[in-house]
């Protein structure tokens, strides 16, 4: 898709702060520091739209980005970040679960994992949760620029098996550095937006 407009719209820590304009929403979930914000920036060709950081736990609210006035990317706080207090984590978990289970404009979830490493226990929990919730999901295995191309199939297999994915869940090899996988992901996401 040719992105002509990409703009930060709002941040939410409670449902009354979600956007009101009823556009479809696509959520980005994944481990802290895996590359969710970088994914958004690469998809829309804007280096600094979503805040990225080498410090995990940077994104702490649901951040909505309006794309071409057609849909929203919703950047999530990462899971599995040890330095967050138990209390705060429980609060986020409840809020995020509320969004994922009851947001009527949510059309699909991009689950981002690291192509370099087998999925973590938290990744597996998220994949199980998404499957049970019945949400349309694409798994994006990012940081592919850090793995030699010949190794990709082996790593994709580890991701698929580690997450216990059903056949119908696509796994796309991606890199926010090189743009690998970008067109393929757009194809999948636009199917959700246009459905
Ligand atoms: P939180 O908001 O803290 O959960 O992190 P995040 O998932 O939004 O990760 P973010 O996009 O901030 O990226 C974390 C780090 O990984 C940054 O240093 C990025 O530059 C780096 N990074 C993200 N994607 C890629 C990629 O495809 N390749 C490489 N080499 N580095 C990446
Ligand atoms: Mg982030």
Image (tube, rainbow, N blue to C red):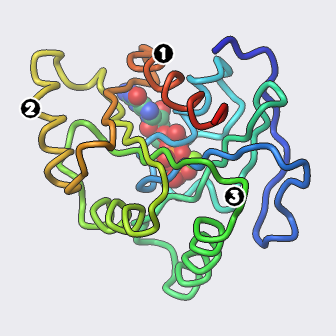
The residue labelled by disc 3 is 62
Label 1 residue SS:
helix
Label 2 residue SS:
helix
User: Between marks 2 and 3, how big is the CA–CA gap?
Assistant: 33 Å
Residue shown at the point (56%, 23%) measured from the top left? 42
Q: Earlier in the sequence, mark 2 or mark 3?
A: 3
Disc 3 to disc 1: CB gap under 8 Å: no
Tell me: is circle 3 under 8 Å from ligand 2: no
Q: Residue 121 carries which label?
A: none
Residue shown at the point (69%, 28%) measured from the top left? 48
User: Between marks 2 and 1, how big is the CA–CA gap?
Assistant: 22 Å
Residue 54 visible: no
Q: Quadrant of residue 14?
A: bottom right
Residue shown at the point (53%, 23%) measured from the top left? 186
Q: Which of 88 and 13 is in front in this view?
A: 13
Q: How crowded is mark 3: few (under 14 residues within 10 Å), some or many (20 or more)?
A: many
The residue labelled by disc 1 is 183
Q: In which quarter of the image is residue 4?
A: top right
Residue shown at the point (69%, 64%) measured from the top left? 103
Q: Residue 40: where, in percent of width, then height? A: 59, 33
Residue 169 visible: yes
Q: Residue 16: where, in percent of width, then height? A: 87, 70
Label 3 residue SS:
strand
Q: Residue 76: where, in percent of width, then height? A: 59, 55
């Amino acid at each position: 898709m040719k992105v002509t407009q990409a703009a930060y719209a709002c941040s939410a820590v409670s449902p009354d702060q979600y956007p009101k304009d009823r556009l479809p929403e696509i959520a980005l979930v994944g481990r802290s520091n895996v590359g969710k914000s970088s994914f958004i920036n690469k998809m829309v060709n804007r280096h600094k739209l979503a805040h990225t950081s080498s410090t995990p736990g940077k994104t702490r609210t649901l951040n909505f980005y309006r794309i071409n006035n057609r849909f929203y990317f919703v950047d999530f706080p990462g899971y599995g970040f040890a330095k967050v207090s138990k209390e705060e984590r429980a609060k986020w978990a409840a809020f995020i679960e509320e969004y994922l289970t009851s947001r009527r404009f949510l059309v699909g979830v991009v689950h981002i994992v690291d192509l370099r490493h087998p999925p973590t226990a938290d990744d597996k929990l998220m994949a199980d949760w998404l499957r049970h919730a019945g949400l349309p999901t694409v798994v994006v295995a990012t940081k592919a620029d850090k793995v030699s191309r010949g190794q990709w199939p082996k790593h994709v297999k580890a991701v698929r098996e580690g997450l216990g994915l059903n056949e119908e869940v696509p796994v796309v090899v991606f890199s926010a550095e090189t743009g690998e996988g970008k067109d393929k992901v757009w194809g999948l996401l636009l199917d959700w937006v246009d459905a």
